Structures are given as C-alpha cells and as structure tokens.
Amino acid sequence: MAEETKKEDRRVRRTKKLLTQALTELLQKKQVKDITVTELTDLADMNRGTFYLYYRDIFDMLEKIEDEMFSSLDGIFKPLEKEGDALQIRPTLLALFQFAAEHQEMCRVLLSPNGDMNFLHRLNEVMREKWRSAWQTIHDAGDDEFDYYYSFVVFGCAGMIRAWVNRECKEPAAEMADLADTLLRQGGLRAGGKGDFPPAGTVFPLAPAGAPGRKNRKEGKFHPVDCAPS
Amino acid sequence: MAEETKKEDRRVRRTKKLLTQALTELLQKKQVKDITVTELTDLADMNRGTFYLYYRDIFDMLEKIEDEMFSSLDGIFKPLEKEGDALQIRPTLLALFQFAAEHQEMCRVLLSPNGDMNFLHRLNEVMREKWRSAWQTIHDAGDDEFDYYYSFVVFGCAGMIRAWVNRECKEPAAEMADLADTLLRQGGLRAGGKGDFPPAGTVFPLAPAGAPGRKNRKEGKFHPVDCAPS
DNA sequence: GCTATTATAATACACCATGTTGATTAAGTC
DNA sequence: GACTTAATCAACATGGTGTATTATAATAGC
C-alpha cells in the first residue's frame, strides 16, 4: 500500500490533485463511462499525455483514488485491532462514518447511481474479517449465515452512508454511529419504535395520511446508546 | 412499461434474446466499460448494425434490461399492496428474494464488482414507499431517520441477495426471507445468537482460532420465524 | 399460398477518442 | 547552479463508433 514512502515531486502532487478535482467535478454531472480523457485534461487544463503518465484510463484513475481511500480507512482501523486486544463495534462504526465524512464528495459520487460497485465490494472485503470475530463470539451459526449477516451489515451501513452524504453529513458522525449501532443490536424495525413492538408475522396497516408519530422527537438526536470507550 | 402490448415480431424477440445472452456471458468475464458493440454482436453472431436498431450503446442496453426486471418486480409486488389493505413485511421480503432467484444471473452481474450502482439506486426507489407505512406505524421518528432506516434495510437486503446469488441461491427463497425478517426485527447482532446477548457498548474479544459455535446447527435451516399468511 | 411488410445482413464511410512516441521546455530537487 | 525529472507539444496509426444505403430473408395478414 504505502510503497511510496518518499514524498512525491510537487509537480506530481499538483497534477494528480488537479486531475482528481476535475474528475470529481465531472462525476457530479455525468457517468464515468461518458467521461473522456480529453475532456478531463481539458478541464484540468493540462496536456492529455500527462494523464497517461499516471493512469491507464478513467476507470483506472477511479480505482487508484479508491486505493488511497481504503489505505486511509485501514489507518483508521489499525489502532482498533491491536492483536490480542478486542474488536469494538461502536468505535469501528464511528471510524467508518468519520471516514465517510472525510471523503464526503468521493463517497457521494461512488455511492450514487453513477457510482462504482467495486467500491462496495472492496468495502465488503475490508470489513469482513473485522466482524467475523464479533460474530463468532456470540453465534453458533456457520460460515453461510455469517456471509449473509455481514453482507447485510456492510451493505446496510453503506446505504446509511449514502443517504448521509447525500444530506451533506448534516448529523455528526457519532450520531450516525449510534443509529447504526442501534439498528445492528435491536433490528431495523424495532430501533426507535414506540415500545409496543409487534411480533413476527404482524401485518402493518398502511398508515393514513395524518399518520401518528414524529412529535416528541429529540432535537437532532436519534436514539443514543451508551458508547464503549476506546 | 408495457407500452408494447402487441407481441413483438419473432425475429425481434430472437435478436434481443441473443444479445442479452451474449451480454450476460461477456459480463461474467469483463467490465461493462470494456465490452464493445463489435464483440457483443460478434459473439451473438449478428450484424453490428442490428444492435443500434434497439440500443444506443452497451450501457443503454443494460438499463433497458433493468427496466424489464423492475417491471416484473412491480408485478410481484402489486398483489401485496392493494389499496386499503396492509403492508406485509415477510411476504414482501419473500417476493424480493423470489425475484432475485428468477433473475439470478443478471442479479449476480449487477451486484458484482463490475455491476451497476444504478440498479441499487432504482431498487431503493421502488422499495421506499413500501416500507414507509410500516415505519410510520411503529415509529415516532421523522423523515430523516426514515431515510437512514430504509437505506439501511434496502442496501442490507441487496447485500444478502448478492451473497445469495453468488452461492447460486443454494438456500430456498423462503429461508432467506426468514433470515432477513429476523435481521430486521431482532438486529444483525442478536439474530441467531446464543441468547446471552451482550448490551450496547460491549467489547467483543477477538475469537481464538478454534472458536466456539457451529456445532448444534440445524441442517440447511437458519432461524425460522413464523410467517404471516398472505 | 401469395403479397405486403418489416427485420436483418452486407457494405461503406467519416469521425473522433485513444494510446503511444520523440523531442522540447519548464519546474523541482539537492 | 547543475542535475534530474515532469509536463508540454505535435504527430501518428489504430479501432470502435454511429449512420446510411441497398439487398435479402423472414414474418404476418388475408
């Protein structure tokens, strides 16, 4: 990952930065497949040949950007998984949402309709082993169930992140981590409910226009659970 | 959607079918962006110009295929949402997994690393209103929370489907619906657990090599909950 | 079965982004 | 200030694209 410890030439940094900015801008308007190298370098105001000095094509560039994002994500996770230590679900969730906030624009683009499935795939890969230990600690079930479980969890969190960055990360990351934590522990239907939770098999009537709810709602706060200190 | 009620010419059906087959085959090996019209029609053994009679480019073709999939999904959902009737979570989940099984190959491709984010986006749109009523029935929370909730649910289910179709839908759709139902009602961590579920904030120790669990596991069955009759 | 209709094949064409090269100029490093 | 490296510029062959035109085959309707 960090095979280039020595700092890059200032010109290289500048070039890559300009290209990344231009790509981010273009991705707001059009799909990746419709972006040409010509228009990218044109927007970045540099020679087209310069692009090929670093990237094979637009998709390759996107992948390299994701590389950097994931190596930064690894950096966030590392202190949480010292060998022999413990996996902490809440701090891991918090780290994930902080990561999303830091790379807000790119996350918004990558999880948008024009986005990149490979991003989700790689996120899945990265998270997998982190959750396996927690899963095995409390479950009898085998690998198959774990596969479905963690796929649900990671994709579910990605969905939350998608909605969150689309609202420009209005809520603090800690709140999102709390919400995700609650969803994971209490279930999507139960979390935040009124208390009289219907059992499985319950048929929910279609809510009328002036539906109940949303009155005694705490200002900007969801349903905080206590948080494990790091 | 069904703007063409009159049956298409047999030749048209044949052409579209051959093209779809060829595209599905190519998508197993390479990314959408690397597939050319030339090689597609070459594989389908037809003239290149014929492709342009129906599609603008490869991506347009993929989108049209998704159109047909979603209209079929609508067909599955319709009988479940008669006006004035009730939204039934479990049957809806079952319909979703049956839909995925029917379009197994295409779902596998669309949710793969080479897949299409727009597919997830459209799935999100379709499911949104179906869950809102159930949400409002039992929650005080407002729209923001709902956004995060349903994004979590839909993406989470998509993750499960992804893992499922990657295993060639080994388990019956009903089992997957049960598992999803349990995940939604009891939470991802609690579902299938040993009973002594740790409270929020618990720190999970990293599981040792020969971890406990996976012994008294029921053959091919997860954790069935009772199912609401339609 | 015959005819009118329509889809596909066959071929040709201009267009443009691509990817690469070699020489030149500019910028950064030490 | 000299050395090193990055970015520019111009040029080029390549290949897929999208479209048009004509010919041929399959289909649908009666």
Image: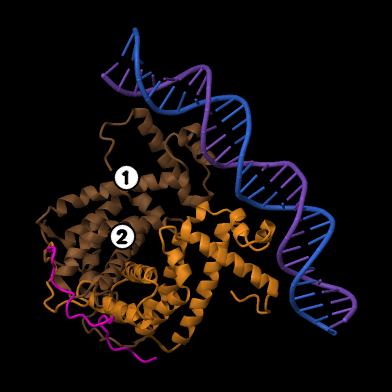
Chain colours: A brown, B orange, C purple, D blue
Up-down relation of residue A146 to residue B39 (above or below): below
Up-down relation of residue B18 to residue A126 (above or below): below
The residue positioned 21% from the left and 80% from the top of the image is B217
User: How many labels were placed on the picture?
Assistant: 2
Which of the 4 image quadrants contains residue A197? bottom left
Q: Which amino acid does label 1 sit on?
A: Glu
Which range of residues does the magenta coloring cover? B207-230
- Which SS class for mark 2? helix
Residue A167: tell me if it is visible: no
Q: Is residue B222 magenta?
A: yes
Q: Where is residue A67 in the image (x, y as percent from the top left)?
A: 33, 47
Q: Is residue B86 left or right of residue A42?
A: left
The residue positioned 37% from the left and 77% from the top of the image is B131
Quadrant holding the C terminus of chain A: bottom left
Q: How crowded is mark 2: few (under 14 residues within 10 Å), some or many (20 or more)?
A: some
Residue A215: tell me if it is visible: yes
- The residue identified by callout 2 is A124
Q: What residue type is labelled 2?
A: Asn
Q: Is residue A17 magenta?
A: no
Q: Nearer the viewer, residue A146 or D10?
A: A146
Q: Position of residue A61 (x, y in %)?
A: 42, 44
Residue farthest bottom in this picture: B229
Q: Which of A52 and B28 is in front in this view?
A: B28
Q: Nearer the viewer, residue A106 or B47?
A: B47
- The residue identified by callout 1 is A68
Residues under labels 1 and 2: Cα distance? 16 Å
Up-down relation of residue A4 to residue B193 (above or below): above
Which of the 4 image quadrants contains residue B92? bottom left
